[in-house]
């Protein structure tokens, strides 16, 4: 007896301002090939902290120009749209979620830099955008941001870091105990009031970076605690001026997290299906047992309907906003938040089920399924946990 | 103001206040306090470091923790008093396991897997009181504690070996071959907790692979025997302090007097062992949830950055839901443990024959002819007869179902509470995040070991929803068990009763 479900793949969506469907299909094929060839074989090594394996993967990413794909061609990029980038990130996440997140963070960082600055970044450099959102602490002295601390995925060993200041409404911030950060934006100098992103070439005396020794997952994007110096003067801080700023940067990161989550969920479903067909218990393949079929069918439903299926489309509509700075930032933000919540919670549920389908084997590191579970949970917590994001939705609604 | 309070046993289990057996309640509280002392002084301070070291090298094992646990009696709570232990059963094991797992489930599992290894010996009758169990107590007193393990799972058979119906159709690759004076064991066992560090392993396998359910038999294996080796130690996501190993057997000789119970009784014995061991697994899961909840409370109470979160109704409701889930999970495992200890097996423990045996001094039991008599086939038959007279398959099926319910529910609570706690803390630069992440990784295993939650719910359906009665008792034979097996008397089938 065969099972009715099949492995779900990303459906190319033609964005209004993005690449054509044919171009996007080409991009997806390129990313899929890259994921299979370079990322999947190294995923376990990267998860174990093998910096050499991570460097190999990054070299392959840079070779095809995916590290700065969002930048215009005249600035050394590939000039692709946000929707295209998200489709690529999802495909890469099937190979390794952490590396895929690195690609997203690097593109987000470059896209938020002033164009000339971004164009001047040496080839192969890896930057990371760090959302200073929920959970970060900041206080403000007159004209100075000080004591800001945040956990940044991909920030460890990065050549540059872009801090994206909070985008949640002041009432949400106040409820979550981040009055300092919102005050920083409200009471800061004129430049600070507008600046939603600050950039630091690393190493920088103004920004202390300390490796996070307890990173749960997505280890392809090595995490670090980043702390602004106790009295970092504003005039040494770069002020973002690129194509993606402020609210848009946070939305891009949320949509990217949704794409990563979806790629992770797809990989978990692929592995679970393969295993369910090959593992026998009770004299039949376990795919014949209803207990397993229930989990496999739930995975399919989540992937088709819930797991950020709309994130690429959302990214396509986001292109207009990102390129001209116009449009409705709030509507865009709502869509990004919703896509991220749906994708991350679906990925967590799918990966938990995948480990359960594997049983004891799935709990062991050699199968790579438990890694997906840890990666998915990180997606749920990045850039803020789902319950905080939901809270923001109510405030902006 | 939020605060982490330590509750007494009576506060945790209100029904114990009505229990007239004050000595029993005092004994449970004493055991819990011993476990708590070990947890506070040794498990909590070492948990993250041991997890990290075992993550880097799965063969890492901290014998210092075992020695410290032995000092608190954590290796002998299941050993009968006749052999120098505490004489506990499922309830004692569960109370200890919750306390240890709230500190570190991996460290707790070292002692839980040891207790699981002992369990089949308790069913095997008094033969082993003065053998390996007494030896375990003696080595502990000599400050050279030894561990046990129980090996059921095989590379091709996980769920299969925990259910007699599936076992009959399973891909069993191990085999015990009859040789003069005993058996030779061949094959591999996988995911065996404590497997790489155990001195003794109780191991189940068929004597005839063509009829695994009918010939499933428990053996006591000396890990220093020729042909025994540790093939691999697994790299686990969590509960790393306790190693899980693949054991390889290449013609390992086991003498007749180390066959546990009778040949062919293994499937029924597995059912009873699982009925006894699943409440403690429910307790491990409850302990994990409690550990996450208490750490979260501590963080919310003490961390400056969490100050405003305490005032959020969302957070308050989450905390209330955690408290609710933990309380109900705890009552679930206590229900199951009480059912197995006092109802299903209570009659056997208080039977006149057993009481009389407890009064026979050890020095007499160890001398011939008493020793030979206790190890004889007749004594094994008498144990089975006693079980038939003092309990029933219906009572054992109900206990197994309640145990499965407690295990599956507790495991889901552990996942739910650790996930919720992790989401409340998020990606904060706070030490509590590392502890919660670890507990979340640890929690997932409780949904898998001791039978997946799905298999456990099948047992709940059979025993409680459908009212089936499973054959949990070894069959009564007149004379030699192996001969009866040859005549086809030992078939394991399920019987439906309404």
Image: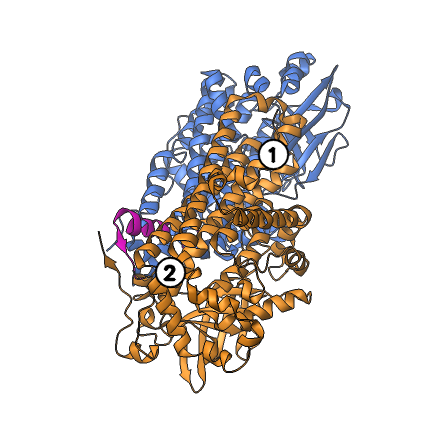
Chain colours: A blue, B orange
Residue A155 visible in the snapshot? no
**Residue sitting nearer the eye, B374 or A330:** B374
- Residue A216 percent coordinates (x, y): 57, 43
- Mark 2 — on which chain does it sit? B
Q: In this view, does A346 lie to the left or right of B301?
A: left
- Residue B16 percent coordinates (x, y): 49, 42
Q: Quadrant of the N terminus of chain B?
A: top right
Q: In this view, does B203 lie to the left or right of B52?
A: left
Residue shown at 52% from the left, 79% from the top:
B227
Q: Which of marks 2 and 1 is nearer the N terminus?
A: 1
Q: In which quarter of the image is residue B302?
A: top right
Distance (Cα) linking label 2 and label 1:
37 Å
Q: Does residue B451 belong to the magenta stretch?
A: yes
**Residue sitting nearer the eye, B353 or B242:** B353
Q: Give the residue at mark 1.
A: B5
| SS at circle 1 | loop
Q: Quadrant of residue A301?
A: top left
Q: Give the residue at mark 2.
A: B271
Residue shown at 55% from the left, 72% from the top:
B130
**Residue sitting nearer the eye, A389 or B496:** B496
- Residue A18 percent coordinates (x, y): 43, 29
- Mark 1 — on which chain does it sit? B
- Residue A269 percent coordinates (x, y): 39, 47
């Amino acid at each position: 007896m065969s099972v009715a479900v099949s492995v779900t793949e990303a459906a190319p969506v033609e964005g209004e301002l993005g690449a054509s469907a044919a171009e996007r299909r080409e991009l997806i094929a390129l990313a899929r090939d890259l994921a299979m060839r370079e990322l999947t074989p190294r995923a376990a090594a990267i998860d174990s902290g093998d910096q050499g394996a991570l460097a190999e993967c990054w070299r392959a990413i840079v070779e095809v120009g995916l590290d700065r794909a969002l930048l215009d061609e005249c600035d050394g990029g590939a000039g692709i749209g946000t929707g295209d980038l998200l489709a690529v990130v999802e495909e890469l996440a099937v190979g390794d979620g952490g590396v895929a997140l690195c690609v997203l963070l690097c593109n987000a960082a470059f896209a938020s830099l002033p164009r000339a600055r971004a164009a001047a970044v040496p080839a192969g450099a890896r930057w990371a955008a760090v959302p200073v959102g929920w959970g970060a602490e900041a206080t403000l002295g007159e004209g100075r941001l000080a004591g800001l601390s945040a956990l940044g995925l991909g920030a460890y060993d990065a050549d540059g870091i872009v801090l994206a200041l909070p985008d949640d409404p002041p009432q949400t911030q106040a409820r979550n105990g981040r009055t300092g950060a919102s005050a920083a934006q409200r009471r800061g100098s004129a430049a600070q009031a507008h600046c939603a992103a600050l950039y630091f070439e690393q190493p920088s005396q103004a920004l202390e970076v300390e490796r996070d020794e307890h990173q749960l997952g997505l280890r392809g994007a090595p995490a670090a605690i980043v702390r602004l110096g106790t009295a970092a003067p504003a005039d040494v801080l770069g002020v973002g001026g690129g194509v993606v700023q402020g609210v848009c940067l946070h939305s891009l990161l949320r949509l990217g997290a949704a794409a990563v989550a979806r790629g992770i969920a797809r990989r978990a479903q692929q592995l679970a299906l393969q295993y369910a067909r090959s593992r026998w218990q009770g004299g039949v393949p376990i795919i014949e047992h209803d207990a397993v079929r229930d989990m496999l069918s739930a995975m399919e439903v989540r992937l088709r309907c819930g797991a950020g299926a709309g994130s690429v489309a959302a990214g396509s509509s986001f292109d207009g906003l990102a390129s001209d700075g116009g449009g409705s930032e709030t509507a865009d933000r709502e869509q990004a938040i919703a896509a991220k919540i749906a994708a991350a919670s679906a990925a967590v549920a799918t990966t938990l089920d995948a480990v359960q389908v594997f049983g004891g084997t799935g709990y062991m590191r050699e199968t790579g399924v438990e890694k997906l579970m840890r990666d998915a949970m990180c997606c749920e917590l990045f850039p803020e946990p789902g319950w905080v994001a939901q809270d923001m939705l109510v405030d902006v609604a | 103001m939020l605060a982490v309070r330590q509750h007494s046993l009576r506060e945790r289990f209100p029904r114990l206040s009505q229990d007239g057996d004050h000595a029993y309640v005092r004994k449970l509280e004493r055991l819990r306090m011993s476990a708590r002392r070990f947890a506070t002084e040794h498990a909590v301070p070492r948990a993250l470091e041991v997890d990290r070291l075992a993550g880097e090298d799965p063969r890492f094992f901290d014998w210092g923790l075992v020695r410290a646990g032995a000092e608190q009696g954590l290796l002998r709570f299941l050993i009968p008093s006749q052999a120098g232990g505490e004489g506990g059963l499922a309830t004692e094991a569960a109370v200890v396991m919750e306390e240890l797992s709230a500190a570190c489930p991996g460290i707790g599992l070292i002692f839980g897997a040891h207790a699981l290894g002992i369990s089949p010996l308790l069913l095997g009758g008094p033969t082993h009181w003065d053998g390996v169990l007494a030896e375990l107590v003696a080595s502990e007193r000599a400050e050279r504690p030894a561990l046990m393990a129980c090996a059921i799972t095989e590379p091709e058979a996980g769920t299969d070996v925990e259910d007699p119906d599936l076992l009959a159709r399973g891909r069993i690759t191990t085999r015990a071959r009859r040789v003069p004076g005993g058996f030779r064991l061949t094959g591999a066992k996988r995911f065996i907790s404590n497997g790489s560090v155990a001195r003794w392993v109780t191991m189940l396998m068929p004597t005839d692979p063509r009829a695994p359910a009918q010939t499933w038999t428990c053996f006591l294996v000396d890990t220093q025997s020729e042909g025994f080796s540790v093939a691999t130690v697994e790299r686990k996501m969590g509960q790393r302090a306790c190693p899980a190993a693949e054991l390889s057997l290449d013609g390992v000789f086991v003498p007749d007097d180390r066959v546990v119970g009778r040949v062919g009784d293994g499937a029924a014995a597995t059912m009873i062992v699982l009925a006894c061991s699943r409440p403690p697994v429910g307790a491990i899961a409850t302990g994990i949830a409690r550990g996450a909840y208490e750490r979260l409370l501590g963080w919310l109470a003490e961390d400056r950055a969490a100050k405003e979160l305490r005032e959020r109704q969302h957070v308050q409701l989450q905390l209330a839901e955690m408290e609710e889930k933990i309380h109900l999970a705890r009552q679930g495992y206590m229900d199951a443990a009480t059912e197995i200890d006092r109802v299903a097996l209570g009659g056997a423990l208080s039977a006149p024959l057993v009481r009389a045996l407890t009064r026979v001094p050890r020095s007499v039991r160890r001398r011939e002819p008493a020793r030979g008599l206790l190890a004889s086939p007749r004594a094994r038959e008498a144990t089975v007869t006693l079980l038939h007279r003092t309990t029933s398959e219906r009572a054992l099926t109900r206990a197994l179902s309640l145990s499965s319910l407690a295990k599956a529910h507790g495991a889901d609570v552990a996942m739910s509470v650790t996930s919720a706690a992790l989401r409340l803390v998020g990606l904060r630069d706070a030490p509590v995040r590392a502890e919660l992440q670890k507990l979340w990784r640890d929690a997932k295993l409780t949904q898998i070991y001791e039978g997946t939650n799905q298999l456990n719910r099948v047992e709940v359906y059979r025993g409680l929803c459908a009212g089936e009665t499973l054959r949990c008792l070894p069959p009564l034979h007149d004379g030699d068990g192996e001969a009866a097996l040859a005549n086809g008397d030992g078939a394991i089938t399920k019987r439906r009763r309404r």
